Amino acid sequence: MIAKITKIIKNYLLLNDDNLKTTDANIWRLSVLRTILLIGVVLTSAIVIHSSYTAYVQELYYVMYLTLGFSAFLFATLAIGLKHIKLASACLVLAVVGASLCILFFTLDLMSARYGLLLLFTLPIIVRVLYGVKASIASMLLNFIPFYLLLNNTQLSPLFGIDITLPDTHTYLASLIFLFFNFCIPMAVLRVMSSLERQAEHNLLQSKKLNKLVSRYQEIFNNGGTPSFFCDDKGRILQANKAARALLKRHNPDGEYIQDLFALSLPITRGVNQLASICNAPEREFKLQPASLEHHKKQLIHCHDLSASKKNMREFDAFKKQQFEKLYVNELTGLKNHHFWKKTESSESILNRHIVLLKLANLREVNLQYGYSQGDQLLLRAAALLQSELPTDVSIYQFPGAKFLFTLNTKHLAQKTIEEYLARKLPSSMMIDSASAKVEHPLSWRVGHYHATREINVDAAAECCAIALSQSSELSPIVSFSVNTVKTIRENTQQKDTVKMLLDNGCLALYLQPQVDINGNIVGYEILARLKEPKTGTVLQPYQFLPLVEQNKWEVLFTQKIIDGTLELIKSWPAGLPPVPLAINLSGPELLSDLFYEKLLRRYSESPELGKRLKLELTETSVLASHNETKRRLTSLSNVGATIIIDDFGTGHASLSQLIDMSASIIKVDREFVERVETSERHRKIVKMTLDLAKSLEMQTIAEGVETRAQLSVLKDMGFKHFQGYLFGKPAPIEHWISASKAQA
């Protein structure tokens, strides 16, 4: 129990470890204030109660009123000190001054009246702690007045004929002065000293850490492998590391100038690299790299030995060649492998070419019958035969699994079909060195063929050949890629091209869905894009083109078109509709585009009124919504006037962290929660918690997906003031809303 009470008192007086360590002056000032007030209240309450009783017995009611009023004032000051430190500080000073003046003006006994003057001498300490040095000096100067009164034994009472002298007045006042000087003021000073001591300890610890960092820097600098010079702005060497001294073959080059040690073509300039040689060794070439230090008129110059770099470059070239052969060349046949195929070929280079994937089907039989060494020899000779039989301008690639790939154009085939050409060119048998003699072994080929009549990436082309190869058999060794598969791929490509064409030509149809207030008045619109084919007038719905936009990373282009269209819509906004804000959706990737972000930021910066008309919605479920750069850029946009809305709130993985890090001012509660708000208690609680959270953060909320009157009623009862959903209107062109406005009028 005692420990619990002690903890409560420490927390109230701000004497716990965290508050003692803090450097915030307001913390220890509040702590001092509470300490003085608490001790003063506790110790003076007994005096006030006892004196009030004596005054009551003697029918000195004005004494009782005065003492009880003083006690009430102290309690009120203690309560005020919980939140308002400045007001409580003023009340404390007022209480001290008031108590002193009451004693001085209403006490006939001169010795007792002196206690009031003594009480004023505490003010410099109290005022210094609570208000600062200037206020403390002022109180010191004012204390010359009570000092003068003390020297001259000046009697000022009774004022207004009021005498508060009681039989025990001297005891009361002596006790009051004793308690104030011996408890309140010392405890206040001790509190300040505790903070100062803790701060001194902290400073000492930081000083030790700084010394360690300096020592570590010196050790790193001196033992760095690169010769380095620490120079002033005129090039005079202040310090050189071990590598630099070894380079110059001098024990201590400090004090010399860098331009005297190196043959420079230009003066040393901060941030400008230049080539130079040592004066006593002109055959060695170095790159001097001056690094400007921002906070010092100094520069750090690194010397990179280019002679060693050139040697390293030669070694690196040899290493690259080795790695190239290891990565791109088959060790057995010497042919370029499938990695090289993907690296060198492209959809353009294979266009209108016949792509052939060969497999030596009976290689496994050779391995089992004659051993793997003979199988390797068979594969090696097969590669050599293919190279000799095929035209010299045909590149052959070695694929995994004893496969070979090459491409042919129409001139290679002439009038022949691919089957006729391969039947003539592919070797049918090969001599194998068995244990007893050379044996002619038949070669069984399987062929997958694909004619690239349209653009297709190399991986897809190879995959088409592999699919065809998997359908080959002994009876049908050569199989071309299925026409049906080609048709499917073509259709997908056509759909992609259609979407891209519509995007490039700006064939966007902007649909508007209203956002209404509690009275049903339209307060804004959300812009929802559709793609519209100009010839047929066919409107593509989001599910028909958004997946292609995401797959092909066209988000930046798509969102830019929406912004351009929205800005044009704002410029030509119909007079019959109220000029309410329009909200556009961002998916996240566009904000990571420097060009898109800079253009959008410039628009808001150059047109301050744009912030009132164009709002930005970022879907919470977007993976990039929690990206640090996305958050930073949203903050910048918010700072220039953009309103940031978190869409689909509650469905993402980091809702609360986004409220902290994103500069959003509006939350849209996802329809997933709204649609079940009238039937599910759990959903109602979640929605209510979201609303309360938004209110506490001073954020506006919009309930989206409202479709029924029942849902609307529940949401209104919760406290929602803005809504969006089919109940108020489906997304439609602006012409629809113009007509609706006229009809209502």
Image (cartoon, rainbow, N blue to C red):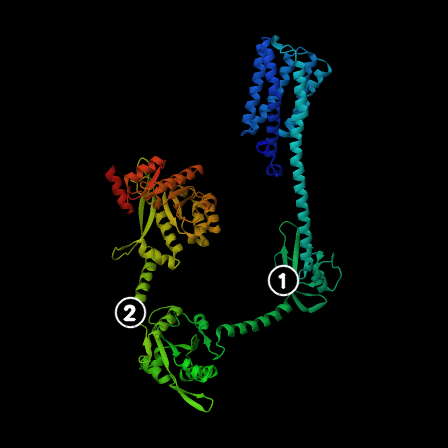
Above or below 11: residue 530: below
Q: Quadrant of the C terminus?
A: top left
Please name whichever residue, 29 or 436, is drawn nearer the observer in this view of the structure.
436
Name which of mark 1 and mark 2 comes first in the sequence. Answer: 1
Q: How many residues crowd around disc 2 within 10 Å: few (fewer than 14), some, or many (20 or more)?
A: few
Q: What residue did someone put label 2 on?
A: 484
| Percent x, y of residue 669 | 37, 43
The residue shown at (56%, 24%) is 77
**Residue sitting at the far right:** 251
The image shows residue 714, relative to residue 182, as above or below, that is below
Q: Which mark is residue 20?
A: none
Please give the residue where the numbered disc 1 appears in the rendered image.
274
Rounded to the nearest angstrom, the CA distance separating label 1 from label 2 is 64 Å
- x and y percentages locating residue 708 in the rendered image: 28, 41
Report the label total.
2
Is residue 138 in view from this perspective? no
User: Residue furthest toward the bottom?
Assistant: 437
The residue nearer to you, when weighing 4 against 430, is: 4
The kind of residue tagged 2 is Asn
Helix, strand or loop under label 1: strand
Residue placed furthest toward the left: 743
Name the residue at 67% across, 28% down.
186
Q: Is 278 located above or below residue 129 in the figure?
A: below
Q: Quadrant of residue 501?
A: bottom left
Q: Determine the residue located farthest toward the front in the rendered image.
A: 1
Instruction: Give amino acid for label 1.
Output: Gln
> Which residue appears at 54% of the width and 29% of the height?
82
